[in-house]
Image (cartoon, coloured by chain):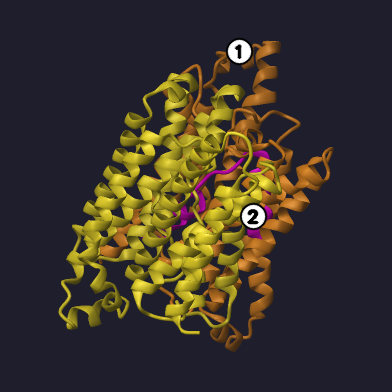
Chain colours: A orange, B yellow
């Protein structure tokens, strides 16, 4: 698929997304400067679209970077426990600093996500048995354990239902003034693009990239920091969106190959497009209520993931 | 001390702990207290044994010490079924429903699910057990998405019932269901006995086992069915204890240092009974019910799992 077709679909869906919702807004209302409708448009619709586009693009890129660095197609924030670590971080921030602002939460979540991702990479180094299906299995087990630790603390503080509603990916709560944190991802995406070639080389392995004169450790660390920052920003503003970082890069690499500089833009656009389509679907199915993005992406995403797994093994 | 006497030692400790649990601080209506406590003990022994047993078998089949059958997605399915009932019919329905029917229904759905999963994946030429697990765990996440969606919508009072289901509990075991579960587990164990002799050979790996004349695929499939049924029964009886099996199976390997599965399985069962009875005792007498045993076990088991992963000398 050509990049420009993807872009055209993305723009079309974006426009549709701006005009779908419980209160009926038409482009005509905006022209007529209908006060209330313009307000709704600016406070709810535009922030929602922006966060959808950014979250979709950045989570997919985060997955792509992780896959490149770990040289495994099935590694992503979901399958490496990064999401669960970030959640644990938010819980810890909630417990220790009850009146914490968003930045404190973000920093604690970031530290946890980063530590967790490093732990996972460390485990990867030690695994002798590198079956590509086995590695996400270890990551998912690790994630399960971290979330059982979160559950332990949440249970003690009677926070379980709170936490699960807080962490569930949902765009309906995105309003102006509450979502701006997600813009942190934009400079990170630029950074990822600038370092794309280095990530590609790092993906060839430590010895090889050192041979080519690359500071391997530094590049890997930078990649993991980008992943951890993106993950915690998206979790705090939107919530968890499972499997996104896994399926989008895999689909792109099927038709684009593995050269990061070429596939980055595709991955970002397709990621946004996928989340946007899922979100529109979730808003239409039980209109005027809506299905949270966590569920739509969870259902469609796990189906695609299983398909990718079975397809891979058929070869 | 060789592995035989070690196994005997574990058996001794289990019996001692069970007796302590039964007769500690016994006052008032002795008969009533003893009945209550022995029901609890029976449930603990039953679930502990079937989880330990199925984990050892599962790890032998997968030739991997860090896996547990609970990750096949069965725990998430259990939560989904319960949350669904509460979400659609309300918690009253769940509490007033005939326990036997509820138990059979939940076990039935879980066994059916694993049957379908096995069927789909074993139909293919290239049977990769890790693929089976990964698909299982992904389906687990899939069920989890539905569960958390419903959890958020449920009335907080109703959610209390969901939360109770989230953690295994030995406190409100129904005697009828217990009897039913015991019968089922005995039947499954009798079926398993035919395969016990193959386990030591299976531990050598697929190729060696086939070389030594074991009908590998058939035996493994039957064993996986046994594992799925046992895990379903124990989960439906008390609730999910995901990491108990991982913990006790590995402790059993470490402690007994043998490759004979008869002893490994017995060892794991006794360690599991010790952990559960001892843990339950501490939770009741020391923490006076302020926390849930399964939460502690998941916590400890989880930490142990990370330790296993990071340990230099890995045997997986």
Q: Residues within 10 Å of mark 2 (few under 14, many from 20)?
A: many
- Quarter occupied by residue B49: bottom left
Label placed on residue A29: 1
For marks 1 and 2 on the same chain, the one whose residue lies earlier in the sequence: 1
Q: Is residue B291 visible from the viewing direction of this image?
A: yes
The residue depicted at 69 percent of the width and 12 percent of the height is A36
Mark 1 or mark 2, whichever is nearer to me = 2
Residue beneath disc 2:
A85
Magenta stretch containing residue B205, yes or no? no
Q: Is residue A80 visible from the viewing direction of this image?
A: no
Q: Position of residue A190 (x, y in %)?
A: 66, 57
Q: Chain of mark 1?
A: A
Report whether A150 appears left or right of B38: right
Q: Position of residue B13 (x, y in %)?
A: 54, 65
Front position in the image: B161 or B40: B40
Q: Position of residue B73 (x, y in %)?
A: 40, 49
Q: Secondary structure at mark 2?
A: helix
- Quarter occupied by residue B131: bottom left
> Would you say the magenta stretch is mainly helix, strand or loop?
helix
Q: Secondary structure at mark 1?
A: helix
- Looking at the rendered structure, the number of numbered marks drawn on it comes to 2
Magenta stretch containing residue A239, yes or no? yes
The residue depicted at 46 percent of the width and 60 percent of the height is B245
Cα distance, mark 1 to mark 2? 45 Å
Q: Find the magenta span and give its range.
A: A225-254
Q: Chain of mark 2?
A: A
């Amino acid at each position: 698929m050509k990049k420009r077709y993807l872009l055209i679909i993305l723009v079309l869906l974006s426009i549709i997304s701006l005009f779908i919702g419980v209160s009926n807004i038409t482009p005509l209302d905006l022209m007529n400067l209908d006060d209330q409708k313009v307000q709704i448009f600016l406070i709810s619709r535009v922030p929602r679209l922006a966060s959808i586009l950014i979250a979709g693009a950045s989570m997919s890129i985060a997955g792509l970077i992780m896959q490149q660095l770990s040289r495994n197609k099935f590694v992503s924030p979901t399958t490496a426990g990064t999401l669960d670590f970030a959640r644990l971080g938010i819980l810890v921030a909630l417990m220790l600093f009850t009146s914490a602002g968003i930045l404190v939460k973000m920093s604690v979540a970031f530290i946890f996500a980063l530590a967790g991702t490093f732990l996972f990479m460390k485990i990867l180094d030690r695994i002798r048995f590198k079956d590509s299906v086995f590695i996400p299995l270890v990551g998912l087990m690790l994630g399960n354990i971290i979330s059982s630790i979160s559950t332990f603390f949440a249970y003690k503080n009677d926070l379980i239902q709170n936490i699960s509603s807080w962490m569930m990916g949902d765009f309906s709560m995105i309003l102006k003034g509450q979502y701006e944190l997600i813009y942190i991802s934009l400079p990170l995406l630029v950074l990822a693009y600038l370092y794309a070639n280095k990530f590609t080389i790092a993906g060839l392995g430590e010895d090889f990239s050192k041979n080519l004169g690359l500071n391997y450790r530094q590049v890997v660390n930078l990649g993991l920091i980008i992943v951890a920052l993106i993950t915690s920003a998206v979790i705090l503003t939107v919530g968890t969106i499972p499997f996104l970082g896994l399926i989008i890069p895999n689909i792109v690499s099927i038709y684009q190959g593995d050269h990061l500089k070429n596939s980055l833009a595709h991955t970002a656009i397709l990621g946004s497009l996928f989340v946007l389509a899922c979100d529109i679907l979730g808003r239409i199915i039980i209109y005027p209520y809506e299905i949270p993005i966590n569920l739509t992406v969870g259902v469609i995403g796990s189906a695609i993931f299983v398909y990718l797994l079975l397809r891979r093994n058929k070869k | 001390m060789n592995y035989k006497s070690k196994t005997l030692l574990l058996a001794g400790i289990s019996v001692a702990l069970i007796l302590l649990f039964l007769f500690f601080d016994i006052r008032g209506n002795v008969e009533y207290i003893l009945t209550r406590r022995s029901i609890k003990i029976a449930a603990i022994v039953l679930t502990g044994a079937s989880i330990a047993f199925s984990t050892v078998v599962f790890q032998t089949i997968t030739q991997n010490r860090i896996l547990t059958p609970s990750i096949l997605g069965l725990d998430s399915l259990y939560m989904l079924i319960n949350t669904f009932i509460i979400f659609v019919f309300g918690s009253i329905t769940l509490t007033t429903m005939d326990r036997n029917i509820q138990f059979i229904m939940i076990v039935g759905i879980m066994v059916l699910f694993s049957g379908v999963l096995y069927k789909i994946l074993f139909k293919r030429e290239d049977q990769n057990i890790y693929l089976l697990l990964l698909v299982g765990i992904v389906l687990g996440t899939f069920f989890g998405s539905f569960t958390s969606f419903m959890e958020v919508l449920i009335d907080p009072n109703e959610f209390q019932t969901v939360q109770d289901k989230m953690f295994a509990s030995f406190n409100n075991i129904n005697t009828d269901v217990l009897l039913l579960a015991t019968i089922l587990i005995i039947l499954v164990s009798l079926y398993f006995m035919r395969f016990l002799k193959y386990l030591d050979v299976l531990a050598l790996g697929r190729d060696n086992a086939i070389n030594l004349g074991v009908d590998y695929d058939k035996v493994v499939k039957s064993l996986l069915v046994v594992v799925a049924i046992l895990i379903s029964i124990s989960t439906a009886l008390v609730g999910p204890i995901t990491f108990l099996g991982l913990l006790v199976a590995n402790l059993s390997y470490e402690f007994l240092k043998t490759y004979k599965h008869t002893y490994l399985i017995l060892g794991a069962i006794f360690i599991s009974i010790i952990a559960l009875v001892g843990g339950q005792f501490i939770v009741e007498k020391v923490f006076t019910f302020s926390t849930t045993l399964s939460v502690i076990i998941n916590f400890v088991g989880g930490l142990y799992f990370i330790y296993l992963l990071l340990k230099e000398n890995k045997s997986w």
